[in-house]
Amino acid sequence: MMMIDKICPGFTIYLKPQEGHGCEFWIVIRALLDRCKDVYEARCLLEEIDIRTNANIMVADVSNNASIFEIANFSSNKKKITERKPVGDLILTTNHYVSNEMKEFDEYHFWHSKMRYTAVWNIFIAGSTKR
């Protein structure tokens, strides 16, 4: 993740960008860094701009707010963005969609993405119960 004084974005790419117009993930990240001071502004910008990528973008700000934005853009009329918040103090993303709202877009994820996601959650949960 890149750290600056406003927001801290990180990302995982999910499938290849679609043909056509819109920003690819690295331009989206740059726009977030340049134009947003918090998670709310990041959400607004992601909804506003044309995005030509499928990605999970994690954003955290200096007020300890964090969200993962799951973005699917499989055609010009089928763009969807969902926002996931931390569960307790934990937030995690890999290369697949987790939100129920994104299930219709989650056709081609890598099988090991779910394994990694589950393994990391299990490590976090085991560690948090030992405190």
Image (spheres, rainbow, N blue to C red):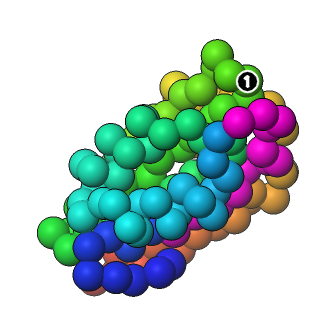
Question: Is residue 63 visible in the rendered structure shown here?
Answer: yes
Instruction: Please provide percent x and percent y for residue 27.
Output: 59, 60
User: SS at mark 1?
Assistant: loop
Q: Amino acid at mark 1?
A: Ser
Q: Is residue 111 above or below residue 103?
A: below
Would you name the residue on which mark 1 appears?
A: 75
Q: Relative to 37, is 104 on the left or the right?
A: right
Residue 4 place in picture, x, y as percent? 34, 82
Residue 121, position as x, y percentages in the image:
52, 64
Q: Is residue 18 one of those drawn in magenta?
A: yes
In front: 131, or 69? 69
Answer whether residue 24 is magenta in the image.
no
The range drawn in magenta is 10-21
Q: Quadrant of the C terminus?
A: bottom left
Residue at the extreme front: 21
Q: Quadrant of residue 18?
A: top right
Task: State how many labels appear.
Answer: 1
Classify residue 124 as left or right of residue 38.
Answer: right
> Residue drawn at (32%, 70%), measured in percent from left and top?
7
Dot 1: within a 10 Å radius of its alpha carbon, few (fewer than 14), some, or many (20 or more) residues? few
Q: Residue drawn at (54%, 43%), measured in percent from left and top?
A: 70
Q: Nearer the viewer, residue 74 or 52?
A: 52
In-front residue for pair 78/108: 78
